[in-house]
Structure formats: structure tokens, C-alpha cells
Amino acid sequence: MDCSRKAFQHLPGSDAMHATLFRQVRPFGGPVTDLAAVDGLLVAELPAGARPVVVEGGGRIALPTLVDAHIHPDKTTWGEPWYSRRPAGSLPEYVAGDVDLYRRQRAPIAERAHRLLAHAVTRGTRAVRAHVDVAPAFGLDGVTGLREAAERLAVRLDVQSVAFPQHGVVRAPGTAELLTEAAATGLVDAVGGIDPAGFDGGDADGREQFDLLFDLAERYGVLLDVHLHDRGATGLGPLRALAARTVAAGLQGRVTVSHVFCLPELSPVELEAAADLLAQAGIALTTVAPSAHQVLPFRALRARGVRVGLGSDGVRDSWSPFGNADMLHRAHLLGWTTDARTDDELADCLDLAAHGGADLLGLPRADLAPGAPADLQLLAGECVPQLVVDLPERELVVKAGRVVAEHGRLVD
Ligand SMILES: [Zn+2]
């Protein structure tokens, strides 16, 4: 196999339609075949007279590009000088660290977010759900900065935005007004929440915070995506309240809960009951696979009809020096934290990064079948489980049938 940097040959096509032929590729590591795309979608065969752009795959594996269902591009120091983190042991301390770092950054949010999301594209990401802090300390800088970054990447990456009250709603006066402004002006797709009973100081059902969120969802049609780190009853109480309120408001399919550390600690019987409650309410979950005891039991949840997405969370921010916005690497970490051993278990991790996130963001699955979005990546390797373990270079990244990145660099 020719893995040189000039391995991909692009021949010009016609202007009337945009057709691409990916020759000699192996979808999901299967037999060698050709994939064809017309105007952004894969097709069983090219129409007569099509003059496609031809990409020689050279026997590389074709995988879907992946979906990062939970990332914080506004907080990142990506491309900035190394930042030495100070110890923090509680949410208030981490939040204070965010503000401190925000004031030290050299580049504005738009630039740092663009750097990080552009990097994600080169690593095979097709879409992200991006949480940006909304708090009196920042105003709507995160929201507008993310929009600027997303516009620069428009044909390469789908970006869903969440106005995230990292500093709390009840405990941070002024935040409710900012969230309302973000939702009312259509600047964001979703509004977030955070630990209503623990961190935000509300009652056991999170009533005050949820009153605002559901009011915004009903008035302005925004999605909801709530960070829930609280464990035990402090987490489960608001989770159950959220499920009940979602059903009462008819918002099934429009609410997500992220992290949900109260679920992995449940017994199998308790987990099944919680999963059924979430599935009936159409509530989706995201995990970032942070550790063996905090990763969501995604197979059990999906088996009972709960949509689950995988994400990066913070990337090289004030909270942690780790992270890289590389969703294949995140699938690898998911395998590591869930103790994946078999090929099926490793393939499940890729499936969550590809289709779990697509389902959560409401995107069509990029399953490499005719009719699917022509969103794919080419890698050299043997088979899907080996790719999840070895993390080879994402040699070519394709969005809507067009090459958007090659050998780690964006293509103009
Ligand atoms: Zn988060």
C-alpha cells in the first residue's frame, strides 16, 4: 500500500453536479470496493455522464467521520503557551480557575475555538455539540466566539451550540438573563444547566433552575443539555425530575443530560429502571469516558433504548492538561475505561463515536450506505478493532463528498 503523502490523486470533475468516486476502499475494513458520492450523499452508482473527482483509496479502510457530542471549545488553551494548572478540588475552585485562565489567554475565544475545531476536523470529526460558558464573568463572549469559529469551518464541520451556565444559575445572578438573551436571539441551539441540587444550591428537584430551562425551551424552541456531576440522591433526584418535566412539556427527544455520574454506581436492576425512565422521556445522555467508575454503561443504556453520545469534554483547559479533540482516540479511551477486550466490544466504541453522536445531534448516520451523508475518512489498517487500538493517521477526511482534510491538514 502506498502511504506516501502524495498517495491521494484528485482528478477534476464536472461543475453541474459534485460527484466523487472513492476507488479501492474497504468500508469498515470489509472487501475492497468503490464508494460514490453525488452532491453530498453516497449513491449506489454514479449517474450516466457524471465526471467525478476521483480519489484513489489504495485499499485503505473507510470509516464514517465521527461526532463529538460534548466539547468545550471556549475553555481550551489549544495553540497557546503551556499553562501550569493549580490544584482544584471542587466545582467552585475549577470555576475560579476558568476565570483566571480566561484573563490570561493571548488569543480570543474565536481563535482558540477555531484552532481546536479545525484540529478536530483533521482528526475525522464531522460534527460537534459545543458547550460555551455563559456567566456574568464572560457575558456572551463564548457564544459569539464559537459562532465566529463555526462560520469559518462551515463546510467542514456541523456545530451545535449550547449556552452553558458553568457558574450556576441560582448562585450566579445575571446568568438567567444572559441565557435568556442567547436563546431569544437565536444565538444558540441549546441551553444548558448544571447540578441544580448540589452546586447550584436549589431544592432536591432542581426546580428553580429547571423552571428557567423549560421556560426557554418552550418559548424559544431551544434544546436542553444539562451537566449532572452530582452522585447519589443529589444526582438522581434532579434526573428523575428532569424526566417527568420533559414528558409533561412534550419535549421528548429534545433533552440531554451529560456525564450523569449517578448512573454508573447503580445496581443492574436500578440501572434498568433508570434507563426505562430516560427512554420513555426521550432523554439522551453523553459520556466522555473519564474513568472506569464514571463512564456510562452505554451498552446497557442503548439496549433499553437510550440514545448515548461520546464526547471530548474540556480539552487542555484550566481543568485538565489532557484531551485532544480526537474522537477515534476518545473511542480508544472508551474501550480502555470499559475494559473492552473482544472485537465486538471495540467496534461498539467506534459505533458510539460515529452513530451515537449522530443520533443525539439529530443527524443522519454516516453508515457508508447509499443515501447516507458522504462523510467519511480513510485510514491504513487491518480492521476496525485494530484501528480503535492503534489510532493510525486519518489520512483523508471527507465532508459531504468533498475532501476537507488530508494528512492532518485542512484542505482549502
Ligand atoms: Zn462538559
Image: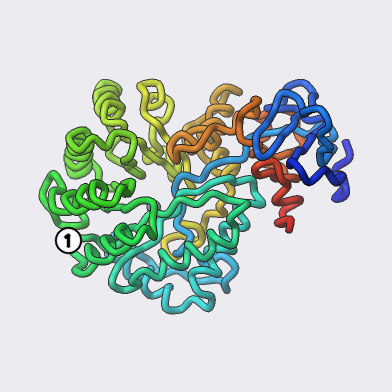
Which residue is painted at 74% across and 55% down in the image? 411
Res. 264 in view? no
Q: Quadrant of the N terminus?
A: top right
Q: Residues within 10 Å of mark 1 (few under 14, many from 20)?
A: some
The amino acid at mark 1 is Val
Spot occupied by residue 226 in the image (x, y as percentages of width and height): 30, 48
In the rendered structure, the answer to whether residue 359 lies left or right of residue 55 reads left
Front one among 391 and 144: 144
Res. 245 in view? yes
Residue placed under numbered mark 1 in the picture = 170
Q: Is residue 93 above or below residue 40?
A: below
In the rendered structure, the answer to whether residue 315 lies left or right of residue 215 reads right
Spot occupied by residue 91 in the image (x, y as percentages of width and height): 29, 60
Spot occupied by residue 108 in the image (x, y as percentages of width and height): 50, 74
Spot occupied by residue 84 in the image (x, y as percentages of width and height): 49, 71
**Image quadrant in which you'd find residue 55:** top right
Which residue is painted at 57% across and 54% down in the image? 324
**Image quadrant in which you'd find residue 375:** top right
Q: Quadrant of the C terminus?
A: bottom right
Q: Is residue 256 above or below residue 203?
A: above
Which residue is painted at 74% across and 41% down in the image? 17
- SS for callout 1: loop
In the rendered structure, the answer to whether residue 63 lies left or right of residue 321 reads right
Which residue is painted at 80% across and 24% down in the image? 32
Colour approach in the figure = rainbow
Front one among 313 and 361: 361
In the rendered image, the residue lying farthest to the left is 203
Front one among 342 and 126: 126
Q: Is residue 307 above or below residue 318?
A: above
